[in-house]
Image (spheres, rainbow, N blue to C red):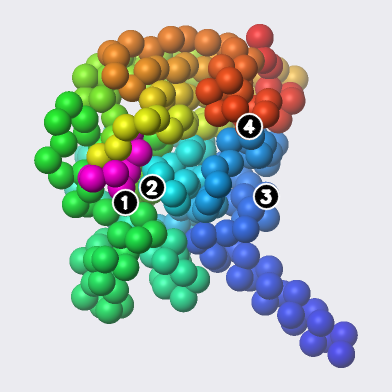
């Protein structure tokens, strides 16, 4: 009986380690969070999905997904920029439809042609490519940007519709891009490891006939490990209809998000990350 119990535990652990939509980040892909501590429950929507973003049998980042609004709440990753081409094509998350579907992100075409999935069924669980067509003044804004990753597979993994939101096109190509490409390079000087969490606050407007929420704000936060005794942190927030970014302390962003989400005090990182 003991060996049977141990076998059951082993199988359970194996399943947790290889499932895409998981029960918690702590048990499945904690490595993307400083001290393996995800944000607290104050950011959780009514119908959340915890996704360990998996591509080619490897986890690349973590996303808390809002099934109702069909946008990510946040994506968490380790900042490792590098040169390389921008990938083409978009992926979706099969396991948002259920645990019997593939555990890695796939193209819509693959699910329709090889797994007998209808586009209608896929669209019930998440945003699809059709939702982001014919946009005016908006485009597909990555939370976890491909330019913050050092190899092609890690950059491809960011091109999943569970990692993007409808973002103001001027902001996405302007002040937000400047933050991602320039401010991050400056701020991470001297950092050994930089943990990043980028999120979106749901707004009152929608695209795709009410299917996909247009966030009211986009925000980003970072916790940098300089060495065993030193950390530094910073944060930004931007209204999703203006081409400007406000630089904040981590504590200021957490207080701002506490007001915007209205679900209690927000904590993005472990307490060892400085708030001032």
Task: Give the secondary structure at mark 3.
Answer: helix
| Of the image marks 1 and 4, the number of the one nearer the N terminus | 1
Residue sitting nearer the eye, 86 or 97? 97
Q: CA distance from mark 4 to mark 2?
A: 19 Å
Q: Are marks 3 and 1 in contact (CB under 8 Å)?
A: no
| Of the image marks 3 and 1, the number of the one nearer the N terminus | 3
Q: Are marks 4 and 2 in contact (CB under 8 Å)?
A: no
Task: Give the secondary structure at mark 2.
Answer: loop
**Foreground mark, 3 or 1?**
1
Q: Are marks 2 and 1 in contact (CB under 8 Å)?
A: yes
Instruction: Please tell me how crowded label 1 is: few (under 14), some (14-19), or many (20+) other residues with Cα within 10 Å.
Output: many
Specify the segment rendered in magenta.
208-214
Instruction: Please tell me how crowded label 3 is: few (under 14), some (14-19), or many (20+) other residues with Cα within 10 Å.
Output: some
Q: CA distance from mark 3 to mark 1?
A: 26 Å
- Tell me the quarter of the picture where residue 42 sits: top right
Quadrant location of the C terminus in the rendered image: top right
Task: Give the secondary structure at mark 4.
Answer: loop
* Residue at image mark 4: 263
* Residue at image mark 3: 26
In the picture, measured across the screen, residue 113 lies left or right of residue 246, that is left
Instruction: Please tell me how crowded label 2 is: few (under 14), some (14-19), or many (20+) other residues with Cα within 10 Å.
Output: many
Q: CA distance from mark 3 to mark 4?
A: 21 Å
Q: Which mark is residue 70?
A: 2
Quadrant location of the N terminus in the rendered image: bottom right
- Percent across and percent down for residue 64 are 51, 45
| Of the image marks 3 and 4, the number of the one nearer the N terminus | 3
Taking the spot 47% from the left edge, 46% from the top edge, the residue there is: 66
């Amino acid at each position: 009986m003991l060996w049977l119990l141990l076998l059951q535990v082993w199988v359970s652990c194996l399943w947790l380690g290889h499932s895409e939509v998981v029960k918690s980040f702590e048990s499945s892909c904690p490595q993307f969070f400083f001290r393996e501590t995800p944000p607290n429950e104050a950011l959780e929507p009514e119908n959340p999905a915890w996704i360990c973003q998996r591509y080619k049998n490897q986890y690349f980042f973590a996303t808390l997904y809002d099934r109702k609004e069909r946008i990510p709440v946040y994506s968490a990753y380790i900042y490792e920029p590098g040169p390389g081409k921008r990938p083409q094509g978009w992926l979706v998350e099969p396991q948002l439809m259920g645990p019997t579907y593939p555990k890695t992100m796939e193209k819509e075409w693959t699910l329709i042609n090889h797994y007998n999935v209808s586009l209608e069924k896929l669209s019930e669980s998440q945003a699809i490519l059709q939702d982001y067509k014919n946009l005016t003044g908006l485009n597909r804004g990555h939370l976890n940007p491909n330019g913050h990753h050092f190899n092609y597979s890690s950059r491809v993994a960011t091109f999943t519709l569970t990692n993007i939101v409808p973002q103001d096109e001027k902001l996405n190509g302007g002040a937000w891009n400047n933050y991602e490409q320039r401010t991050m390079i400056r701020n991470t000087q001297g950092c050994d490891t930089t943990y990043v969490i980028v999120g979106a606050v749901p707004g009152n407007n929608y695209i795709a006939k009410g299917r996909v929420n247009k966030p009211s704000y986009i925000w980003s936060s970072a916790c940098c490990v300089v060495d065993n005794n030193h950390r530094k942190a910073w944060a930004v927030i931007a209204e999703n209809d203006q081409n400007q970014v406000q630089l904040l302390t981590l504590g200021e962003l957490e207080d701002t998000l506490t007001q915007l989400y209205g679900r209690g005090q927000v904590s993005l990182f472990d307490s060892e990350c400085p708030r001032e």
